[in-house]
Amino acid sequence: MYISNKNKGVVLLSVLMVILLLSSIAAYLGNKYFISLKRFAYLEYQTHAINYYRGVESISINRIKEEIDANKKYLPRNHPLLNDTFSYEANNGFIKTTVKDISNCINVNSLVRLENNQLKDNSENIKRVKKLFDLLEIDEIYANEFIDQAIDWIDKDSDPRPYGLEDYYYTGPLVNPKHYSGMRYFYDLNELKSLPVSRIIGWNHIVENFCALPITERSYININTFKKGEGIMLASAFEELSIDDAEYVIFNMPEEGFDELNTFFNNFSNIDFGDVYTDINFSTNKFLLVSELITDEFNSKSQITIYYGNNKNGDILARTYNGI
Ligand SMILES: [Ca+2]
């Protein structure tokens, strides 16, 4: 069959077009296939991660149970429970986990206490928060606003405290998006961002010194587990203690800690502590379990707050996952 040169060109062009089209389809399908493969691998990782984190959680609660029950009144910062990193093998990777004592942060929910099912001011903890803001050189009016806005957010009435705010403010023209106050404990520190005073105080000050554990109890500190740089949190617990003196105390604490209050005060008889705004303990019942699941392809993190109270159940107060 005779094909003219002109027609040959058209045929060649058509063939090239078909090849181009086919290769684009192949690339598109290949890409789709790759994405769905990746997605499938991620879904598999996600399912495994939840199971691993739950497994590690129950192993860790058992460890806390064993350690605390064996020596309930005493948990120094060099205790293996707070220092050992545990690693476990996982599919194509491993999971590592550590336990921290979180009794020394100021629980914002402990600004109130429960008495006969009624929320009352927790005056001792209010004094501690005022001392903290004083140490941070924050104007007293903002300390009062912080305390009152936080309590108004928690309480169930709609009467604002002297420096507080209720729903009339949160649903009013100054707030966008409009919302209601919580009428419950803060579950997460980020919820404090809805208090307008948080912006004035500065978010870094709040994150560094506060926590939001959805419980209220007589607050206490574990004198044994303060670390270098946490002087301000220790100083906030005492009427007269300065940040420098608090750092001195932390630096000179024996690694094995104290198990008796008189020994502690005798050891630092040159320091002026003044009144105490919180109970002083040598152990704790509040822990943060931090775990990471690292595989060839993915990474994720879990943070679990554990309350090991009198019922000895090891109740989970909060679970936060990142990356799954
Ligand atoms: Ca109120």
Image (cartoon, rainbow, N blue to C red):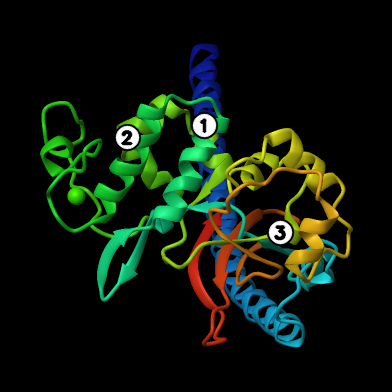
Taking depth in this image into account, of 253 and 173 the one nearest to the observer is 253
Q: Which mark is residue 223?
A: 3
The residue at the point 14 percent across, 43 percent down is: 167
The amino acid at mark 2 is: Glu
* Image mark count: 3
Residue extending farthest top: 6
- Distance Cα–Cα, label 1 vs label 2: 14 Å
Q: Residue 145 carries which label?
A: 2
> Dot 1 corresponds to which residue?
134
Identify the mark nearer the N-term, 1 or 2: 1
Q: Is residue 93 visible?
A: no
The residue at the point 62 percent across, 55 percent down is: 104
Taking depth in this image into account, of 300 and 191 the one nearest to the observer is 191
The amino acid at mark 1 is: Asp
- Distance Cα–Cα, label 3 vs label 1: 21 Å
Answer with the quarter of the image where residue 56 lies.
bottom right
The amino acid at mark 3 is: Ile
Identify the mark nearer the N-term, 3 or 1: 1
Q: Is residue 69 visible?
A: yes
- Distance Cα–Cα, label 2 vs label 3: 29 Å
Image quarter hosting the C terminus: bottom right
> Is the shortest distance between ligand 1 and the CB of mark 2 under 8 Å?
no
Residue 166 drawn at (x, y percent) = 17, 43
